[in-house]
Image (cartoon, grey):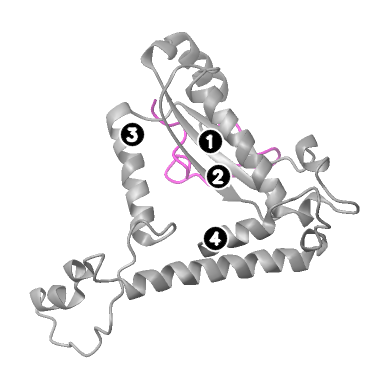
Amino acid sequence: ISTVNWYANCLMYRSNSMHLLHRFGHLFQQYIVDMYAKIEHSRLGYYVLNQKKMRAELYSGIQDAVYLNDNDMTNLGWQVIIPSSFLGSPRCMRELYQDAMGIVHYFGKPDLFVTFTCNPTWPEITNSLLGGQSASNRPDLCFHVFHMKLEQLMHDLTKKHILAKVVAHVHVIEFQKRGHPHAHILLILAMADKPPEAFAIISRHMVHELCGEKVCLANVPLACYMKNGRCQKHYPKNA
């Protein structure tokens, strides 16, 4: 059994248990953080001990240094290659970025920007809290409910096409300062669902106007600081 599977079992909510761990408040959250650090340390340790299996010599910094005629060979050290399979690693983030740019290159610019935020007062959360608890005491419960609702939302958007027919999409999950997650979703629509009439309405009512004609914020003239007669954020932008 893996480390992550073991701790997932420890966090499992069971109807025939006292759930002492889930009642510890901030101490429970500290326990989750420590578990995550232990899991990440275990995964990184695997990559350190299995560099040969990953053929890390193909990335050898020594070969690169020799190729670049680097005379100072004393500061090369021992290089450990973290592959893209490690979530959050530079290679992982670079691959995800390149995938997103490849989608945009093939399908065109996104048409809809959708933000989906966790609501700590959802009945699925409040009805599952133990006595005396608030949503901030149960980040595991909040994210579990959020993830299920996000999956349903993505199904409605990409399979049922409740807004329009979606040909490509990208989304990312972030966490707010208070701990609740939210997702930013980019949707690229089919050409048949992008009529000129809809674009004209959005352009007329929702596009940032020229700075100077109207203030950007109430009672704050030139709030976005005009530069050379144009908005610092380059509005209005070309379609």
Residue 164 position, x and y percent, is 49, 16
Regarding mark 2 in the picture, which secondary structure is present there?
Answer: loop
Q: Nearer the viewer, mark 4 or mark 1?
A: 4
Q: Which residue is mark 4?
A: 4
Residue 10 position, x and y percent, is 67, 60
Q: Earlier in the sequence, mark 3 or mark 1?
A: 3
Q: Which residue is mark 2?
A: 224
Q: Residue furthest bottom?
A: 74
Regarding mark 4 in the picture, which secondary structure is present there?
Answer: helix
Amino acid beneath label 1: Cys
Q: Is 107 drawn above or below residue 143 in the view shown?
A: above
Regarding mark 3 in the picture, which secondary structure is present there?
Answer: helix
Amino acid beneath label 3: Val
Q: CA distance from mark 4 to mark 1?
A: 53 Å
Q: Residue at x 40, y 59 (%)?
A: 86
Q: Residue at x 65, y 41 (%)?
A: 146
Residue nearer the viewer, 193 or 96 = 96
Q: Nearer the viewer, mark 3 or mark 2?
A: 3
Q: Which residue is mark 3?
A: 104
Q: Earlier in the sequence, mark 3 or mark 4?
A: 4
Residue 142 position, x and y percent, is 70, 47
Question: Is residue 221 part of the magenta span, yes or no?
Answer: yes
Q: CA distance from mark 3 to mark 2?
A: 29 Å
Q: CA distance from mark 2 to mark 1?
A: 8 Å
Q: Earlier in the sequence, mark 4 or mark 1?
A: 4
Q: Earlier in the sequence, mark 3 or mark 2?
A: 3
Q: CA distance from mark 3 to mark 4?
A: 35 Å
Labels 3 & 4 near each other (Cβ < 8 A):
no
Q: Which residues are magenta?
A: 211-239
In the image, taking residue 87 as reference, residue 23 lies left or right, namely: right
Q: Which mark is residue 211?
A: 1
